[in-house]
Image: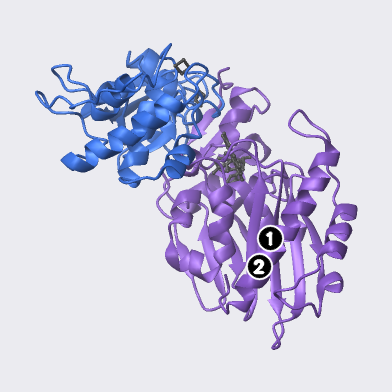
Chain colours: A blue, B purple
C-alpha cells in the first residue's frame, strides 16, 4: 500500500495528498490531518450523499464501505484510509439510474420519509447483506441497530432489508456492487 | 463538531512507532481504530498535539493461540477476533463478550486492545481481562513490560499506559477443565454501552459441584468490579444453584451511580438478575464438559 503520510509526520496545519478509490474511481485531494473522512467525501470530493448526523458514531448516517466493510466515516480520518477503496451511496445505483436492489426495496417498503438517515441505512444494509445473505428477522434488527431513524419507526426499513435479501439471493449479486445498466430491480407490490 | 488540529504520524513499523512515541512523549496519543478517540476529539474532550496512527503500520496484527493462552496484537479489530474460531474456541467467553461490544460497524474498526487501553467502565473486554487474570504487553523504544489486568485498569477511562508507551498485545489465559463462563448484559439498544453487565466463570469439582466461582461486573463501578463468589456457592450442585447469597454479596460490593440512562438502584437490581442468569448458564456449560 502506498501512502503519502509518513512516520516523520505532517504538521497540524499542513496539507497532505490523500488518494482513495471511491466507487471505482481514483480520487485525491490535499487535506489537513484533522479532516474527517465524512468531510473529505462531502467537501473535498463533493460527494454529498454521505450524511452527517451526530459526528460521534451514534447515528450511522455517515456509514460508508471501506474495503467492502461498513464503517463510520465521521470516526475515521481521511489520512488513515489513504490508498484504500471506498463505496458510498453514490456507488450503488446503475449509471442509467436503475436503483440498486436495496434502494428499490426501501422505496417499495416506505423505508424512508425525510431521507436523512437513508444513505447510512442503505450502505449499512449492503455491508450487512454481504455477510448475512439469508438473515432472520432478529439478525436484521441487530444488523441495523447501529443506525438511527427519526421518521419511519423502522418497520419499513426491516421489511426493505428482508426484501433486498431475497432479491439478492435470487440474483446472486454482491450487494456491495454497483447495479448494472438495464438491470432494474424487480420490486414488490406492498399492500396498504 | 470537528476535531482540533493535530500533527500526524503514520509509522510503517513498530520500531518507527516506538521511536516516534518516545520523541513526542506526553504530546502524542496513539490512534488505533479511533472508535473511542475520535468521538472525544470531535466533542473537543481531548486535544492531543499529535496522533501516531497505527493504520499504515505493517505488523501488530497477529492472533496467536497456544496451549495455555490467546494473544491478540494491537491492530486486531473486535470483529476480526470475534470471527477467529481458534481464539474463541480457546477462550469462549471472548466470543460471547465480543457479541456485546458495540455495533458491527463499530467493531469493524475498533480494536480489542484499544478498548482495554481506553478502560471504559462499561466496556466488555476489560472485564474479560480482569476476570480471567489476563495481561497487557506494553513497549517503549527502551524495552517492554507486562502489566496484570488489576494493575493496569486504574479507573474510568484510565489505564496505566505511560507517555511514550505503545500497548502491543493483550494476553488471556485459557480456562482449565470443568470450567464454564458466561457474559450477560442489558443495554437500551443492542450495541450500546451496557447499563450493567456481568462476566462469570464457574469451575466444578469431580462431582460436578461448584469448586470456585467469580464474577466481573461492568457499568457499576470505576473499573470492572470483580467479586469472588466461591464462599457463597462452593459445594452447590451445578444444576441446583441457590445463588441468593452470591447475588446479595455482589449487590453489596458494586458501586453503581445514577445517570440519564438508569438509576443506581435499578442498576444494582439488574446486576443481581444478570448474575443469577449468568451463573446458571456458566455452571451448565461447565458440567457439559466444555470450557464454554
Ligand atoms: C456508538 C459506539 C458504541 C460503542 N459501544 C461499545 C460497547 O458497547 N462496548 C465497548 O467495549 N466499546 C464500545 N465502543 C467503543 C469501541 O469498542 C472502541 O473500539 C474501543 O473502545 C476503542 O478501540 P479503538 O481501537 O477504536 O481505539 P481508539 O479510539 O483509537 O483509542 C482509544 C484510546 O486508547 C488509546 N490506545 C488505543 N490503542 C492503543 C495502543 N495500542 N497503545 C496505546 N494506546 C492506545 C488511544 O490513544 C486512545 O486514548 C463504542 C463506540 C461507539 C462509537
Ligand atoms: S454522523 Fe457518523 S455516526 Fe452519526
Ligand atoms: S427517514 Fe427521516 S430520519 Fe430516517
Label pair 2/1, CB-CB below 8 angstroms: yes
Indicate the chain on which mark 1 is placed: B
Secondary structure at badge 1 equals helix
Judge whether A148 appears above or below B165 on screen. above
Which x, y percent locates residue A19? Answer: 30, 28
- Tell me the tag on residue B282: 2
Q: Is residue B117 above or below residue B199?
A: above
Q: Residue furthest right?
A: B252
Give the image location of residue B279, x and y in percent. Answer: 71, 64
Q: Is residue B130 left or right of residue A32?
A: right
Residue B60: % across, % down: 47, 55
Quarter placement of the N terminus of chain A: top left
Q: Is the CB–ligand 1 distance for label 2 below 8 Å? A: no
Q: Is residue B60 visible?
A: no
Residue A160 screen position, x and y as percent: 35, 29
Q: Which residue is mark 1?
A: B278
Question: Which residue: 53% across, 37% down?
Answer: B34
Q: Is the residue marked by circle 1 packed among few (<14), some (14-19), or many (20+) residues within 10 Å? A: many
Amino acid at each position: 500500500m502506498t501512502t503519502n503520510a509518513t512516520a516523520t509526520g505532517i504538521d497540524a496545519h499542513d496539507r497532505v495528498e490523500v488518494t482513495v478509490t471511491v466507487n471505482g474511481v481514483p480520487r485525491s485531494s490535499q487535506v489537513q490531518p484533522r479532516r474527517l473522512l465524512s468531510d473529505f467525501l462531502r467537501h473535498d470530493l463533493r460527494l454529498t450523499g454521505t450524511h452527517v448526523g451526530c459526528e460521534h458514531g451514534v447515528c450511522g448516517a455517515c456509514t460508508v464501505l471501506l474495503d467492502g466493510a461498513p464503517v463510520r466515516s465521521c470516526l475515521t480520518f481521511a489520512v488513515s484510509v489513504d490508498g484504500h477503496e471506498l463505496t458510498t451511496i453514490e456507488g450503488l445505483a446503475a449509471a442509467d439510474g436503475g436503483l440498486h436492489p436495496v434502494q428499490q426495496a426501501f422505496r417499495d417498503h416506505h423505508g424512508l420519509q425525510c431521507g436523512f438517515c437513508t444513505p447510512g441505512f442503505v450502505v449499512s444494509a449492503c455491508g450487512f447483506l454481504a455477510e448475512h445473505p439469508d438473515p432472520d428477522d432478529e439478525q436484521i434488527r441487530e444488523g441495523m441497530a447501529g443506525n438511527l431513524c427519526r421518521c419511519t419507526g423502522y418497520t419499513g426499513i426491516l421489511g426493505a432489508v428482508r426484501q433486498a435479501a431475497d432479491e439478492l439471493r435470487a440474483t446472486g449479486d454482491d450487494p456491495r456492487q454497483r447495479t448494472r445498466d438495464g438491470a432494474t430491480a424487480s420490486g414488490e407490490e406492498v399492500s396498504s | 463538531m470537528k476535531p482540533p488540529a493535530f500533527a500526524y504520524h503514520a509509522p510503517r513499523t513498530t520500531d518507527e512507532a516506538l521511536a516516534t512515541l518516545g520523541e513526542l512523549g506526553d504530546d502524542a496519543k496513539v490512534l488505533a481504530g479511533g472508535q473511542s478517540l475520535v468521538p472525544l476529539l470531535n466533542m473537543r474532550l481531548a486535544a492531543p498535539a499529535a496522533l501516531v496512527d497505527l493504520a499504515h503500520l505493517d505488523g501488530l496484527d497477529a492472533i496467536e493461540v497456544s496451549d495455555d493462552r490467546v494473544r491478540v496484537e494491537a491492530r486486531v479489530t473486535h470483529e476480526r477476533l470475534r470471527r477467529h474460531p481458534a481464539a474463541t474456541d480457546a477462550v469462549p467467553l471472548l466470543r460471547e463478550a465480543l457479541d456485546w461490544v458495540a455495533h458491527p460497524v463499530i467493531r469493524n474498526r475498533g480494536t480489542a486492545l484499544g478498548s482495554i487501553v481506553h478502560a471504559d467502565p462499561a466496556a466488555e473486554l476489560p472485564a474479560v481481562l480482569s476476570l480471567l487474570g489476563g495481561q497487557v504487553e506494553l513497549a517503549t523504544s527502551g524495552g517492554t513490560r507486562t502489566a496484570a489486568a488489576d494493575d493496569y485498569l486504574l479507573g474510568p477511562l484510565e489505564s496505566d499506559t505511560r507517555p511514550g508507551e505503545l500497548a502491543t498485545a493483550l494476553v488471556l489465559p485459557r480456562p482449565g477443565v470443568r470450567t464454564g463462563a458466561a457474559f450477560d448484559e442489558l443495554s437500551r439498544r443492542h450495541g450500546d454501552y451496557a447499563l450493567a453487565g456481568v462476566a462469570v466463570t464457574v469451575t466444578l469439582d469431580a462431582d460436578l459441584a461448584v469448586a470456585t466461582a467469580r464474577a466481573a461486573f461492568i457499568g457499576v463501578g470505576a473499573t470492572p468490579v470483580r467479586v469472588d463468589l466461591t464462599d457463597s456457592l462452593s459445594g452447590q450442585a451445578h444444576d441446583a444453584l441457590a445463588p441468593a447469597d452470591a447475588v446479595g454479596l455482589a449487590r453489596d460490593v458494586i458501586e453503581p451511580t445514577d445517570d440519564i440512562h438508569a438509576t443506581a438502584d435499578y442498576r444494582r437490581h439488574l446486576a443481581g438478575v444478570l448474575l443469577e442468569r449468568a451463573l446458571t448458564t456458566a455452571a451448565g456449560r461447565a458440567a457439559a464438559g466444555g470450557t464454554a
